[in-house]
Image (cartoon, rainbow, N blue to C red):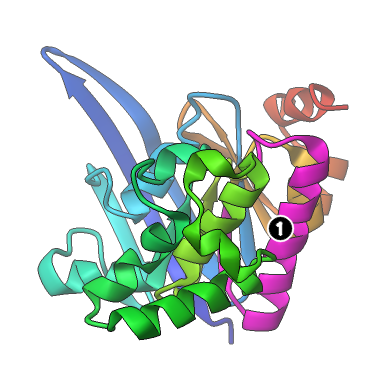
Amino acid sequence: MADIILKADHLKKVFISGKKSMTAVDDVSFELERGECLGIVGESGSGKSTIAKMITHLEPVTDGQIFLKGKDITHVGGKSLRKTYQDIQMVFQMPMESFDPRCTLGDGIGESLRNMGINRTETRTRVENLLERCGLSKEYADRYPHQVSGGQCQRAAIARALAVSPEILICDEATSALDVTVQKQILELLIELKEKENLSFILICHDLALVQAFCDKVLVLYHGKTVEYGTPDDIINHPKMDYTKKLIDSVL
């Protein structure tokens, strides 16, 4: 029997501005098994990032439900929300913008650990270990975001996400701002984390080659709706919808 760690059931998100409304996500459902990677693809404005924000409670859900390990987390708050953030972490597209420029990378990575009551000495040790797990030497803990490259900063962002030992990592276009060589290095790091630590991933991406290399399932969105949902090979090699064919043709 499949071990479903995350389930989205008929998710809907409507943004309202004055008398106008815009449906960004419309009746989207999917399941994520433990240790699996789900790729969510589609053009800009298709609703990919909005789904990630609903899962992480950065945006409220208009309709539908989100289940984490069988528990409804759609509208949780307080201690339950803090527990959700321990289970689900997000890595963003622009790593340098996700760090406070006034603080070192080590301070940024260790913030969640300090918030959990871990003393500074233990936090420093854990931060250095996290950096090394993500391919950076411990000296990077004392560097500021502007003192490192985009790829190094993204490794530090992944280290920060791993600090609370999450079970799910959501990567929202986490490699799109990096050059091709660095993209490959970050992908190799994510694959290593997936294989060694049995992490589950949601990879929000427009690069179908990346999706095919890393993901077990793919959800294709168009104007907030699901147009295809299946394995990468089936969808890329045998697309059923014209939109998916155009998406594939655009990157070939």
Quadrant for the C terminus in the image = top right
Residue, disc 1: 215
The crowding category of the residue bearing disc 1, from other C-alpha atoms within 10 Å (few below 14, some 14 to 19, many at least 20), is many
For the residue pair 89 and 139, the one nearer the viewer reads as 139
Q: Is residue 23 left or right of residue 136?
A: left
Q: Is residue 63 left or right of residue 10?
A: left
Q: 221 above or below 157?
A: above
Q: 71 above or below 95?
A: below
* Residue sitting at x 24%, y 78%: 116
* Residue sitting at x 11%, y 14%: 18
Residue 114 appears at what percent x and percent y? Answer: 27, 74
* Residue sitting at x 49%, y 44%: 145
> Start and end of the magenta stretch?
175-203
Residue 187 in magenta? yes
Q: 208 above or below 75?
A: above
Q: Secondary structure at mark 1?
A: loop
**Amino acid carrying mark 1 in the image:** Cys
Q: Is residue 193 left or right of residue 162?
A: right
Residue 49 appears at what percent x and percent y? Answer: 45, 39
For the residue pair 77 and 118, the one nearer the viewer reads as 118
Q: 3 above or below 238?
A: below
* Residue sitting at x 38%, y 85%: 122
Q: Main secondary structure of the magenta part?
A: helix
